[in-house]
Image: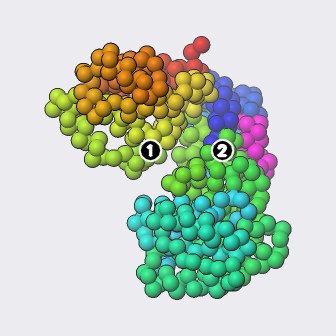
Amino acid sequence: MFDTLTERLTQSLKNVTGSGQLTEDNIKDTLREVRMALLEADVALPVTREFIAKVKEQALGQEVLTQLSPGQAFVKIVHDELTKMMGEANQSLDLAAKPPVVVLLAGLQGAGKTTTAAKLSRYLKERQKKKVMTVSADVYRPAAIKQLETVSNEVGAEFIPSDASEKPIDIVNRAIEQAKIKFADVLIVDTAGRLHVDENMMDEIKALHAAVKPTETLFVVDAMTGQDAANTAKAFNDALPLTGVILTKTDGDARGGAALSVRAITGKPIKFLGMGEKLDALEPFHPERVAQRILGMGDVLSLVEEVERKIDKEKAEKMAKKLQKGGSFNFEDMLMQFEQMNKMGGMMGFLDKLPGMSNAGLQQAIEQAKPEKQVKKMESIIQSMTLKERRNPELMNPSRKKRIAAGCGMDVAEVNKLIKQHAQMAKMMKKFANPSGLGKMMRSLGGMQKQFGGGGGGPLFGNNNPKK
């Protein structure tokens, strides 16, 4: 998400970052570029105009013009205004109400409400430790009821059956009673997809909302529809008292116009981002972190939280202790590292959140190296080994290599390449196992960024162009 916008904005802001002083002329030129970048990202025109006006007003103030690094101060203004545009801080769900807290999902057809209901269930169960139940009030598409049952079972949420012959209000009232009996903390209600121009369908959801009085009414919208997402959200907000928005399919949206327009147009906060098809791909929306990513500064906080949540600490600690005691880093350990990386969304998912890694040239260089494909190859080779070979890398001889290569359908050269990679990784892991390993790792990351010309993280820190 935001790849196109990030590329354009970092290029535009680079013109003033290195300037000894800011003048009305170079600010005017830069703001013209920023304006075009926002419009190309499908940010609504009124939102773009207001944003540019606010940045210009602050940039021409004496506090900025008299600073030693006015270019960096200008970038900070852009960052702060982007954050304000998107809502300043994350607004979480109101879970303090008397249980069951009813969360009503509304939206257009095909926006991903049913999948989002399951993702939200998983999020609340795993991160908030809540008992969650789900129910479908979509009586127009019988397959939707079965779909919600399937995905609810996958995430461990209790599903309340419903029937297409029932009225939506009756379904939800019955579900609320069942949720009370079973002491559920949250009841998520999936509703039928509807068009905001369909008066009958809009009247139905208004009546449903009035009857059940949900604590949270969330509008689920496809981010790939750009500023149309914001306009549709406004139309629904005029009909329903929305408490927030969930943007889905953001992993397929390179522009980011919806995220930048929704709050400004509706006045309602974006509460979550759907980041992919998997049922754990739902993340709280943090405006400041998103602004940092847009400006190429990375999102280290989200990365740390993801590592904390997804990495198997017990396995990691066990391996660290083994290495500290002089044990060897074997192929089993290597395979475990690959598995942990896959949980983080693969190599690209990890690098995307590091400062300086949003540069288009750098991204292209990494993508051309096909890291995910290479990792899958190495996993296949390790899985073709016997348990004894995985635990004892020194056993590798020509006949074993030949057998392993035949087992995974590759050349012996690929096996040799893996062995070389393993040796390098073992050396690196040995260093990181020491208490001073974190510092060494950070220096390694810095070196990797310099190797690709990353400079140090976005327009605040100098040149981001990859070396030719």
**Magenta region:** 34-54
Amino acid type, mark 2: Gly
Amino acid type, mark 1: Lys
Q: Is residue 69 visible?
A: no
> What percent of the width, then of the height, locates residue 306?
43, 47
Secondary structure of the residue carrying numbered label 2:
helix
Q: Foreground residue, 423 or 451? A: 423
Left or right relative to 199: residue 220 = left
Q: Is residue 43 magenta?
A: yes
Left or right relative to 16: residue 320 = left
How would you rate the neighbour count of disc 1 (Cα within 10 Å): few for under 14, some for 14-19, many for 20 or more?
some
Q: Is residue 290 above or below residue 459?
A: below
Earlier-in-chain disc, 1 versus 2: 2
Q: Is residue 413 visible?
A: yes
**Residue at screen point 53% across, 46% down:** 289
Read off the residue under disc 2. Answer: 252
Q: Is residue 44 above or below residue 365?
A: below
> What percent of the width, then of the height, locates residue 113?
64, 63
> What percent of the width, then of the height, locates residue 134?
54, 72
How would you rate the neighbour count of disc 2 (Cα within 10 Å): few for under 14, some for 14-19, many for 20 or more?
some
**Residue at screen point 47% across, 23% down:** 410
Read off the residue under disc 1. Answer: 343
**Residue at screen point 51% across, 39% down:** 349
Q: Foreground residue, 372 or 417? A: 417
Residue 210 lies in quadrant: bottom right
> What percent of the width, then of the height, locates residue 334?
34, 32
**Residue at screen point 45% across, 77% down:** 184
Secondary structure of the residue carrying numbered label 1:
helix
